[in-house]
Amino acid sequence: MEAGVSLGHVEVGANVSIGAYTYIRSGSELSVVSEIGRYCSIGNSVILGQQKYTHPTDWLSTHPFQYTNNHLTYTPRVSPAVIGHDVWIGHGATIMEGVNVGTGAVIATKSVVTNDVLPYAIVAGVPARVVGMRFPDDVVKRLLESEWWNRDPIEIRALPLDAPLASLQILERTPATAFTFKSISITRRGFAVAR
């Protein structure tokens, strides 16, 4: 985890990196997810990386009796979800394993995301579908190229944040300086602060 991460009561079942200033509200589960970017806003009861293939669908039964205390084994295919930077995920949403959610995307409350989400897309529904874009294509391209989430937070806070085009103009004419967020590694055995 990088600096400024805020976690409520969250169940973590995977090795996951969480970027600076991301917050995750209580009741959420990090199942099969490998990466959550910087500045993400994740609501209550969100499931990231819901497994798809936990039971065999092409066997006699889907029940685990077939491979529990038996000579058969079943190993589900697993592919982690990846969440980009500046993603907003609403209350009760589910992101399936293997899904890539692009930077700047918005996932509506109670949506079930089964396919990749483009950067800055707004998706809603079951299954989730694109219902709009946050910005026109040319602005999305400029935002992605700016990589503003890699800059010093003090520099970002000084921007006219309620005016994205004005912020982009400043970012585009100001060279990015190298900035490294402090991070901490947490395991079941304890934690260590990265230097």
Image: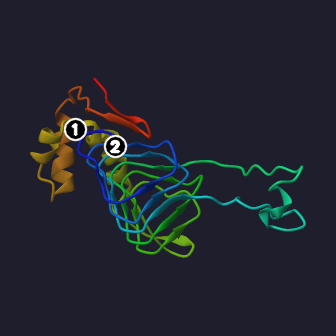
Residue drawn 21% across the image and 55% down it: 164
In the image, what residue type sits under mark 1? Glu
Residue drawn 20% across the image and 27% down it: 177
Foreground pick, 4 / 130: 4
Could you say where residue 112 lies in the image, as x and y percent from the top left?
53, 70
Of tags 1 and 2, the one toward the viewer is 2
Colouring mode (rainbow / by chain / secondary structure / one colour): rainbow
> Disc 1 designates what residue?
172
User: Is residue 184 left or right of 72 when viewed as pictured?
Assistant: left
Residue drawn 37% across the image and 47% down it: 141
What is the number of callouts on the image? 2
Foreground pick, 91 / 87: 91
In this view, the residue farthest toward the top is 195
Could you say where residue 45 lies in the image, as x and y percent from the top left?
42, 68
Using the rendered view, name the quadrant where residue 64 is placed: bottom right
Q: Is residue 179 above or below residue 79?
A: above
In the picture, which quadrant includes the C terminus? Answer: top left
Disc 1 crowd, CA 10 A, few/some/many (<14, 14-19, 20+): some
What's the distance in space between the residues labelled 1 and 2, CA to CA?
23 Å
For label 2, the SS is loop
Q: Which mark is residue 29?
A: none
In the picture, which quadrant includes the N terminus? Answer: top left
Could you say where residue 167 lies in the image, as x and y percent from the top left?
17, 48
In the image, what residue type sits under mark 2? Gly
Q: Are marks 1 and 2 in contact (CB under 8 Å)?
A: no
> Disc 2 designates what residue?
19
Could you say where residue 41 lies in the image, as x and y percent from the top left?
31, 59
Disc 2 crowd, CA 10 A, few/some/many (<14, 14-19, 20+): many
Q: Earlier along the polypeptide chain: callout 1 or callout 2?
A: 2
